[in-house]
Amino acid sequence: MDAPIVGTYRTVRFRAGPVDAIASDVDLLIVGMPVLSATSRIDPGACALDAALSGTLSQLRAGGLFDGRFGETMILSSPPPPVRCRSLMIVGMGEIDDLDAERLGRLAAVAMRAALRLDSCSIACLLRLLDPAATKVAQRAAARAMMAGVLTALDAYLSPGPAPDRFAGLNWTFDQPDSAADVLGTIIAQWPAAPQ
């Protein structure tokens, strides 16, 4: 992925731009899935991924192995071609009507903590508002909350010392519309100094 860098914090490079759920060659791909009753409102990237995996995500949900409850996670290692990521993390988004910027920020923090525990070096995050009619203001608020969520998780995981060498090359890409990408860099630039 050649998405532009929007900022660097604690040796983690953050990028923003389109993420192809199938072709992204990353260590960890993060995809949000709502509860089963909201199947018709799943993100297009997640739909494409499910199709590429012969309906595996739908089967996990239908079989009750992954309900899509808010904050629920499941990691699938080594998904088969044509999917190129080395691991896939599904994050439960809960009820779509309850999904707002604050809840997306909490989900982004969950995703960052998991990525750090997995020692992932390249991460693509497809968490976002699932309302196709979301305004630019709502998209920017969601981007702001998600960046704050990942930075908070990063600080908590690495506190009180500097980042370990294994995180020196970590790249995190947010799948964000252009109208929200600049917000991510602003949050990084304004973020409180990390404890040392």
Image (cartoon, grey):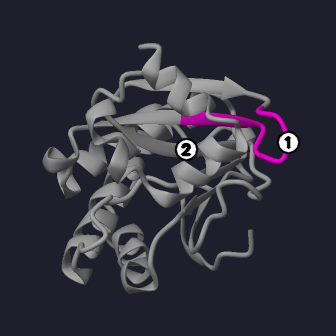
Hey, which residue is sitting farthest top in the picture?
64
- N-term mark: 2 or 1: 2
Residue identified by numbered label 1: 81
Q: Percent x, y for residue 125?
A: 53, 53
The image quadrant that residue 72 belongs to is top left
Dot 2 and dot 1 residues touching (CB under 8 Å)? no
* Span shown in magenta: 79-89
Question: Image check: 159 left or right of 125?
Answer: left
Q: Quadrant of the C terminus?
A: top left
Residue in front for this viewpoint, 155 or 177: 177
Q: Percent x, y for residue 177?
A: 44, 78
Residue identified by numbered label 2: 30
Prevailing secondary structure of the magenta residues: loop
Q: Is 97 rendered above or below residue 67?
A: below
Q: Residues within 10 Å of mark 1 (few under 14, many from 20)?
A: few
Q: Secondary structure at mark 1?
A: loop
Residue in front for this viewpoint, 107 or 167: 107
Q: Secondary structure at mark 2?
A: strand
Residue in front for this viewpoint, 139 or 81: 81
Q: Quadrant of the N terminus?
A: bottom right
Q: Percent x, y for residue 92?
A: 37, 33
Q: Residue at x 51, y 45 (%)?
A: 31
Q: Percent x, y for residue 98?
A: 14, 45
Q: Is residue 80 magenta?
A: yes
Question: Image check: 12 left or right of 120?
Answer: left
